[in-house]
Amino acid sequence: MDLFNGNEFNILSENVQNCVLCPRMCNVQKILNRSAGFLNAELMFIGEAPGRLGADSSGIPFHGDKAGHNFEELLEFANINRSNIFVTNAVLCNPRDENGNNSTPTKTEIQNCSKFLEEQIKLVNPKIVVTLGGVALESLNYISKHDLTLRDSVRTANKWFDRLLIPLYHPGQRAMIHRSMANQRSDYQFIADTAKNFTKKKNKSYGTIVNVGVVAIINYLFEKKDSFTYFALHKLFYLIEYKSVLKFGFRLTNSYIVRQKDGPYCTELHILKIKKALSYLDSKVLSASNILIYKNASDLFSGNLNGEYPELDKDVKALIDEILLEHGNKSNAALKRTVYFSRPMRNILAAERDNNINLYNTPISFTL
Ligand code: SF4
């Protein structure tokens, strides 16, 4: 990729400074300057608007107020270097109400500023766009339509405008009610993993098989085999995700997988969750540490006959078939050995050894 022409950015920034499109903001400062970050960034974050105590005060997007502190803490947690990213907002002026407090930009203001947002995206040309909050996500509709909602699509990678779009919640305190800080840390880990893996595969098409969905994968596993131990299900799911990273360059789902005492554990595979999602499944305790998940005999034909779950891409099916062929009939002990020898788990075990600690419940990074 050619190095970005800084002059183009300067011209755009100057045009923004002269903008008078929105009556209530035509005389306020516009926050688009080089502090936005790296002009050739592969990762672009888009917020809602400069905050009164944040960007409008510091001149730097997401810096100086509580939302900025949280944002920076989240970046640091996921080891995302701010100097390598580009940070901007859907509207570039600070909207305030009659009392001088922050207010939400109107649809017209968002639409007015979308031409600048589009220019920024085209100039920086990031491979991944991350929206922070519902307003930022909706603002992208003025550039290229999508049908994503924050609630349904948070922490998922979606094809949009010739790149990936990942919707996240806003890091401000109000959004923490809907998305805890702990959950947001996982979101940023997902961003870091996706960026590192996806940007390595520059020439690889990411097609339509990102964000397949945990239930669709589990449903397919049970199409192929009538029962699995609960232990095996978690380990096989982890191996499927890992193989996807190796083969496609990205994970298939946005599931949260942590290192537990006996290896990888996926929170989305909680036994109650999968039984609720796939009503044909039942379970029985085999021993204190072993549970069998199996198809209910009276419901053997319910599977996916009604097309309830998204049909998996043929490449994804082929990948799962490979995992099942290689590992599907292994004992729990053999499966445990297999996952412990995989790179992501080896990295965690090495960190534990080097620092003489255990890292139980640490998110497993699939970065290669
Ligand atoms: S918000 Fe955007 S469109 Fe509106 S005045 Fe500011 S720079 Fe112009």
Image (cartoon, helix red, strand yellow):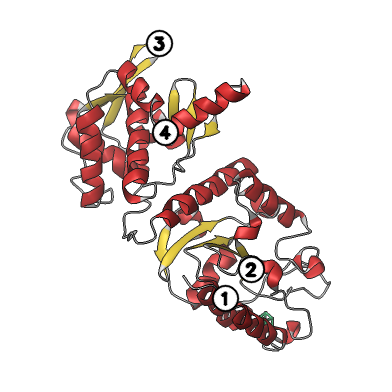
Residue of label 3: 288
Any atom of ligand 1 within 8 Å of the CB at mark 1? no
Q: Could you tell me the amino acid type at mark 2?
A: Thr
Q: Position of residue 83 (x, y in %)?
A: 65, 59
Quick check: marks 2 and 3 in contact, CB under 8 Å? Answer: no
Quick check: marks 2 and 1 in contact, CB under 8 Å? Answer: yes
Say what secondary structure mark 3 lies in. Answer: loop
Residue of label 1: 120
Quick check: marks 3 and 1 in contact, CB under 8 Å? Answer: no
Say what secondary structure mark 4 lies in. Answer: helix
Residue of label 4: 343
Which disc, if any, is residue 88? Answer: 2
Q: Could you tell me the amino acid type at mark 3?
A: Ala
Q: Give me the C-alpha separation between circle 3 and circle 1.
A: 57 Å
Q: Give me the C-alpha separation between circle 3 and circle 4.
A: 30 Å
First reached walking from the N terminus: tag 2 or tag 3: 2
Q: Residues within 10 Å of mark 3 (few under 14, many from 20)?
A: few
First reached walking from the N terminus: tag 3 or tag 4: 3
Q: Residues within 10 Å of mark 4 (few under 14, many from 20)?
A: some
Q: Nearer the viewer, residue 226 or 266?
A: 266
Q: Is residue 289 above or below residue 106?
A: above
First reached walking from the N terminus: tag 4 or tag 2: 2
Q: Residue at x 53, y 69 (%)?
A: 138
Q: Could you tell me the amino acid type at mark 4?
A: Arg
Q: Name the residue furthest top.
A: 287
